Image: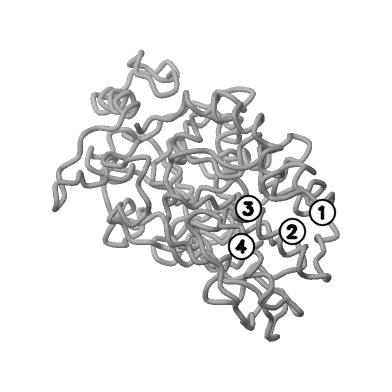
Amino acid sequence: MRPDASGSARRGGTPLSRRAVLAAGTAAAALAPVPASAAPGGRAKLRTGFERLEGDGYALLDGERVGVVTNPTGVTRDVRHIVDVMHTDARVNVIAVFGPEHGFRGTAQAGGSEGRYDDPATGLPVFDTYQKSGQPLADVFTASGVDTVVFDIQDVGARFYTYIWTLYDCMEAAQLAGKRFVVLDRPNPVTGRDALGPVLHKEFATFVGRQPVSQAHGMTVAELARLFNKEFLTTPVKLDTVLMSGWKRSDFYDASGLPWVPPSPNMPTPDTALVYSGSCLFEGTNLSEGRGTTRPFELLGAEGVDGRWAAAAERLGLPGVHFREAYFAPTFSKFQGKTIGGVQIHVHDRAAFDPVRTGIALLVTAKQVWSGFAWRSDNWIDKLTGSTLVRTKIDAGATADEVVAAWQDELQAFRQMRKEYLVYK
């Protein structure tokens, strides 16, 4: 079947059931969001991809053995996990789960996974996808016995957040294994208004960026899946996307009415996601990015940093944000157990705030006011930003505005490509 289309009532030469024919129509309908019932105040109530799939009786998955790529964020609005819901519903046949970084149930910290085990709650086999791609991951899908792989994970809108590359790797592996792929959409918590930041250069491709995408992509996972399938996969996978209804590109997460489940241990709130696509760049330095505190990525600092940093950043007059001199003692990660100085990022106007420009400005001012500033020895900053541009410009004494100006041509090219795949208006 052609991705996202319903031009045939046969798959693989086998006649389809009546429900499967209806499912094909569902996939075609998913090309555009449908009206949603009104919520209090006249606002259309958001329905996630899973809510629309369940509301249609899982017609899109009729007669198929299903595996689900998910983590703790794959929940209903009453915080039941979708795997638990589907496992007890006779209308759908879930036979496997695939866990990404941090794991299906979320028991692993950054850079870890849960491995292969049987889920105690459902008895389903859980397969580990972390650090697997290409044929090895295709072999996992084949061994699981599934016909269709379903993806449902909450993203945070940044290129270097690894779940979108789990999506990419799983799409590629599903194609290699001859499996169909279904993406259940969820909101981009920091809106889908625009793409921001530098675009990855292919020679810097890693698990924090496989393909030329801007640092803040401004897309949902379903939109990204469509872009990946047409622009980056050598051979497209059989793709269906189940879109949301009731979501607008200008919506921040609190407009969704959905509960926030931390997608990873250091992403505790939507406020974290708001700053993350800029402040995560401090992972590429010898300063703390706030891991081990209650406000990761909002608190930044190091030993020897004082109030001059916050003052220098505040003098820039960046839109939508203020900077407060702050002192904190991380309980793990960099500077564990030591009281260090730095800044806290306070966003007062989300619509005006530019997280990537802010992150660059903080790098520039940190280097100006603190003599101990250094990049990580492995040049991790180049992997995060997608090229040597940011590091070399800052080392050469460029201002934040000069650094931002240097990536505009590549960013405009990505924005132009991105337009074709924006299905929410």
Between 130 and 271, which is closer to the camera in this rendering? 271
**Badge 1 vs badge 4, beta-carbon distance below 8 Å:** no
Left or right: where does residue 83 sit relative to residue 102?
Answer: left
> Which label's residue is closer to the chain start, 1 or 4?
4
Query: Of tags 3 and 1, which is closer to the observer?
Result: 1
Helix, strand or loop at mark 1: loop
- Dot 3 amino acid type: Tyr
- Rendering coords of residue 247 (x, y %): 31, 42
Between 66 and 99, which is closer to the camera in this rendering? 99
> Which label's residue is closer to the chain start, 2 or 3?
3
Residue picked out by circle 3: 130
Residue picked out by circle 2: 284
- Dot 2 amino acid type: Gly
Residue at 43% over, 40% down: 193
Helix, strand or loop at mark 2: helix
Residue at 49% over, 41% down: 218
Q: Which mark is residue 315?
A: 4
Quote the CA–CA distance across marks 4 and 3: 43 Å
Quote the CA–CA distance across marks 1 and 4: 29 Å
Left or right: where does residue 128 sit relative to residue 239?
Answer: right
Helix, strand or loop at mark 3: loop
Quote the CA–CA distance across marks 2 and 3: 22 Å
- Rendering coords of residue 403 (x, y %): 71, 44
Colour setup of the view: one colour
Determine whether 135 is above or below 323 in the image.
Answer: above
Residue picked out by circle 1: 379
> Which label's residue is closer to the chain start, 2 or 4?
2
Q: Residues within 10 Å of mark 4 (few under 14, many from 20)?
A: few
